[in-house]
Image (cartoon, helix red, strand yellow):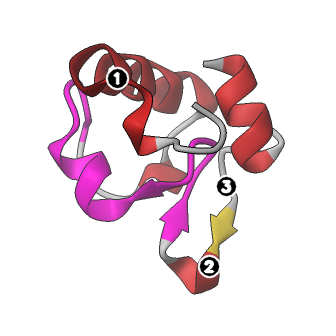
Amino acid sequence: ARSTAQCESGRDATAIGSGGIYRGAFQFLKSTWKAAPRSPGGDPIRYAYKTQAVVAVALKNRDSAGHWPVCG
């Protein structure tokens, strides 16, 4: 998870990319974040890096690294 977050955002839990489409350390789409296992819902940038990482790992375990085609 660390290397993916580093590649996506420099591990910045409040990062916003592509005009607000991608959000958080893992650059989640809001729809992906909300549908991901263990997601608390809402906007990922409102949660700490650790929470985002837990969700990202659960999502990767369920769907593989396809959500991060460059950094996964």
Q: Is residue 45 magenta?
A: no
Identify which residue is drawn at 49% across, 32% down.
52
Disc 1 residue crowd, few under 14, some 14–19, many 20+, Cα 10 Å? few
In the orientation shown, which residue stands out farthest toward the right? Answer: 10
Determine the residue positioned at 39% across, 37% down. Answer: 66
- Image quarter of the C terminus: top right
Earlier residue among tags 2 and 1: 2
Q: Which portion, as a residue range, is magenta?
A: 22-40
What residue did someone put label 1 on?
Answer: 64
Q: What type is the residue that disc 1 sits on?
A: Ser
**Which numbered mark, 3 or 1, is in the foreground of this view?**
1
In this view, which residue lies farthest toward the bottom? 19
Quarter assignment of residue 26: top right
Q: Is residue 5 toward the left or the right of residue 34 in the image? A: right
Which residue is the site of mark 2?
Answer: 18
| Image: 45 above or below 26 | below
The image position of residue 11, as x and y in percent, is 76, 37
Please identify the quarter of the rendering in which residue 12 is found: top right
- Residue under label 3, please give it: 14
Residues under labels 2 and 1: Cα distance?
Answer: 23 Å
Where disc 1 sits, the SS reads: helix
Residue 19 in the figure: left or right of residue 66: right
Q: Is residue 69 visible?
A: yes
Residue lying at 47% horizontally and 26% vertically, measured from the top left: 51
Residue 22 at x, y = what percent? 52, 65
Disc 2 to disc 3: CB gap under 8 Å? no
